[in-house]
Image (cartoon, rainbow, N blue to C red):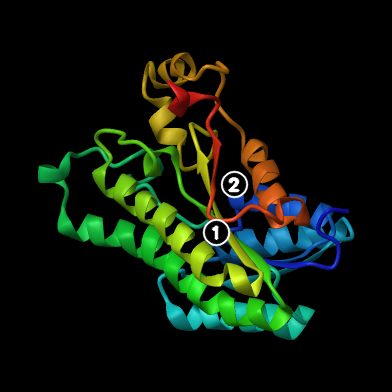
Amino acid sequence: MRLESKVALISGGARGQGAAEARLFAREGAAVVIGDIRDEDGLKLEAEIRELGGQATCVHLDVTEQDQWQSAVSQAVDQYGKLDILVNNAGITGMEGGGLTSTKIDGTDAELWDRIMAVNSKGVFLGTRTAIPAMRAAGGGSIINISSIAGIVAIAPAAAYAASKGSVRLLTKSTAVQYGREGIRCNSVHPGFIETAMTELRLSVPGAREQAIAETPIRRIGTVDDIANGVLFLASDESSFMTGSELVLDGGWTAQ
């Protein structure tokens, strides 16, 4: 198994893409700590993984709160002995129910901007900062930050979302450069159009799904498993010489 004896903490791990990562990690031998504000969903996933013979623990985690990050990392270490992997997966788009923020810069409310930045940017910073001492104690680790194609190219009108995901991309590189000598790797993942609860509203707009498929060279919408498989590679020792890099999983969208 590719993650045998490893311990992983996944933020936003109770549903969607995070849940797919948690299930896959558990199947590959990792003990998984599921961090999320959706306690009921997290507990159901914990039970599901355990019923299948895996190791999983659900913890309440609001990624904008330093004390909750500390509690989540401490529980991982206390229960499983160490922390090897952090997936900064939690994020919001800024549109209730999914989709990208629907306003241009001059129409973006400052409160909305702050909320998106707090979850998508500050949350990754807090998670990274809190996990590093535990990974240092473990002799190294892998941090995987979920960014977006919007963190590489501008997607109008999604200024706040794009800015938050762009910051994740550069924080990833700074982390990689600063901690590589300690055996701590950090890479970012940039999904394209993926079928999740977050994108359900946007893709349900008449013509939006067809347009997304037409703009993607592979000619389909991505799945959460497409992303989870990429995250698994970055979490595993197979990517031991890879840090500070972007793994773009977008069906060729940004290649055009």
- The quadrant holding residue 136 is bottom right
Q: Which of 140 and 131 is in front in this view?
A: 140
Q: Nearer the viewer, residue 75 or 40?
A: 75
Disc 1 crowd, CA 10 A, few/some/many (<14, 14-19, 20+):
many
Mark 2: amino acid: Gln
> Which residue is denoted by mark 1 in the rendering?
12
First reached walking from the N terminus: tag 1 or tag 2: 1
Q: Which residue lies furthest to the front in this view?
A: 181
Answer whether labels 1 and 2 touch (C-beta < 8 Å). Answer: yes
Indicate the amino acid at tag 1: Gly
Mark 2, Cα crowd under 10 Å, few <14 / some 14-19 / many 20+, is many
Residue 227 placement (x, y as % from top left): 62, 41
State the quadrant of the C terminus: top left
List x then y, in percent, for residue 39. 58, 66
Residue at numbered disc 2: 17
- Residue 43: assigned label: none
One can see residue 96 in this view: yes
